[in-house]
Image (cartoon, rainbow, N blue to C red):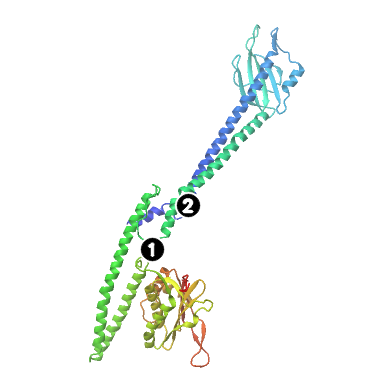
Amino acid sequence: MQNSTSNQLFETKGSQSYSLSGQLLLWLMLCLFVILSISAVVSYSRAYLFANLAYDRSIYRAALALADQVDVVNNKVKVDLPQIAENLLEYDQHDYISYRISAPNGKFVAGDDELDLPTQKVPSGKHIYYDDVLNEDKVRVVAYALPIINSKLKGDLLIQVSETREKREIMVREIIEEMLVPQILIMLITALVIFFSVKHSLKPLNRLKNALASRSHSDFSAIQTTNTPLEITPLLDEMNALMRRVEESVMFQKAFVADASHQLRTPLAILQNQAELALREDVSSHTQHALQNIATSTEHLSHLVHQLLTLARVEPSTNSNFSYTPFDLSNLAKEVTKEWVPRALEKEIDLGFDITNIDVTTSDSSHMVMGNAFMLKEMLSNLIDNAIRYTPSHGEVTVSVKQNQLHVLLQVRDTGIGIPPEQRQQVFKRFYRIQNTVDGCGLGLAIVKEIANSHDAEVFITGNAEINTHANNNPITNKTVGCIFNVQFQLFPHVNSHD
């Protein structure tokens, strides 16, 4: 139930992984972009306001100048504005300036009658600013209500001065450039600071990753939580608790393997010995056959138990007690090959060690690898046992060790039935057996694979080729290679004793 809950917890967010630093940078950059956008809007509005404040005063002064030239004579409004003054009023390098003077009743008096009256009432003696359109151009307008004094006319004269917006737009752009360019530079610098800050803040996670990657599979010691961010301390505590539980499970498995080794092997050995002793007695043929079946079955069961216990010992979770040292693989291969000669002779199989495969390009005839001698001996024994089992009588099994500048290659070659190419990866699975083959438990090659993996070695199968052999000065005969089991190790940097 706990397993299912934890799986559902991780599946709720989807199965795709993501980068924590990428997520942090993305959100921080989005925040920076939003801030920059808001700053741009605020900067534009403030620049627009400042431009209006500056040029609104100019058109207001023009309206006051017009007011000085307006008079009421005999209840009629007169504008004493010389032509040159009118030309100066309307002239501007960038903008077009126009004006309109209206009577209290709104009747046009002077100026440009295309300029519309304001939509709102202007208080007497006051002025207002507003935006309008004149001749399809956007204009800024000031409307000034000039009170009429000493006249029968009642109300205010309305003086309007309009100006197109080109100077204002130029000023807005200049203000924006002056304000935004430094802001953009500050934002870029801030983005760089955020980028390096995020990378620096996530360094503890990288150190944790490297620390875990450098550990061996047998190291269950607690991860140090000192000098780590508070945010990942609970995670480390849970990982340490998990490691303790895994260590307890591994210790229990080791104890089980040790107990099973003693509790199973001893009774089976006794049973097999008793059956073999009984076979020597003078008994009926029926009893003889039954005892032979018991002895054979016991032998098979003993082999299966041995294989199961060996597999349990060499698994990564339980092989932490094995030490790895540099040694000569060719010497070990010779010794193991000699031990299997009697078994090969029983099946009339020619088992040998090929010493002609020593690499002539190297001055050193040793084949140094880093490994555990017991485990590699067990691996080679399983390869030789497998080759003998699947090679018919009068066949050949050859063990050889080769070397180049980087690798040491252990080979076990036989003239047996071979393995189809499509099954060469599957035979390393536990209890996998090829159909219509001899008896076996299907664990030998699984053990080979586990031991090879624990030594960072590569195991692969080749075969189904033709080789030439010489025998007793007879003509060359062709013998089909059944299988070649190859185990490729990293060459240990061996140093000669005289160095």
Horizontally, residue 273 falls left or right of residue 59, namely: left
**What amino acid does circle 2 point to?**
Ser
* Residue at 66% from the left image edge and 22% from the top image edge: 58
Give the residue type that dot 1 points to. His
Q: In the rendered image, which quarter contains the N terminus?
A: bottom left
Local SS, label 2:
loop
Q: Residue furthest right?
A: 83
Q: Residue at x 53, y 92 (%)?
A: 475
Q: Is residue 103 above or below residue 363?
A: above
Number of marks present in the image shown: 2
Where residue 301 sits, quadrant-wise, is bottom left
User: Would you call the spot at circle 2 few (<14 residues within 10 Å), some (14-19), or many (20 or more)?
Assistant: few
Residue situated in front as seen by the camera: 184 or 45: 184
Q: Is residue 267 above or below residue 232?
A: below
Q: Residue at 30% across / 83% down in the picture?
A: 296
Image coords of residue 348 (percent x, y)? 40, 89
**Image quadrant where residue 284 sits:** bottom left
Say if 438 sits above or below 207 in the image: below
Specify the label residue 217 is tagged with: 1
Instruction: Identify the residue at horizontal 51%, vertical 47% (top origin).
Output: 196
* Coordinates of residue 38 in the picture (x, y in percent): 54, 36
Query: Could you say which quadrant of the image residue 71 lies in?
Result: top right
Could you tell whether 241 is left or right of 414 in the image?
left
Residue 92 placement (x, y as % from top left) = 72, 25
Q: Is residue 205 among what the camera can see?
A: yes
Q: Would residue 441 be found to the left or right of residue 478 on screen? A: left
334 vs 120, left or right, is: left
Mark 2 / mark 1, whichever is N-terminal:
2
* Tag shown at residue 19: 2
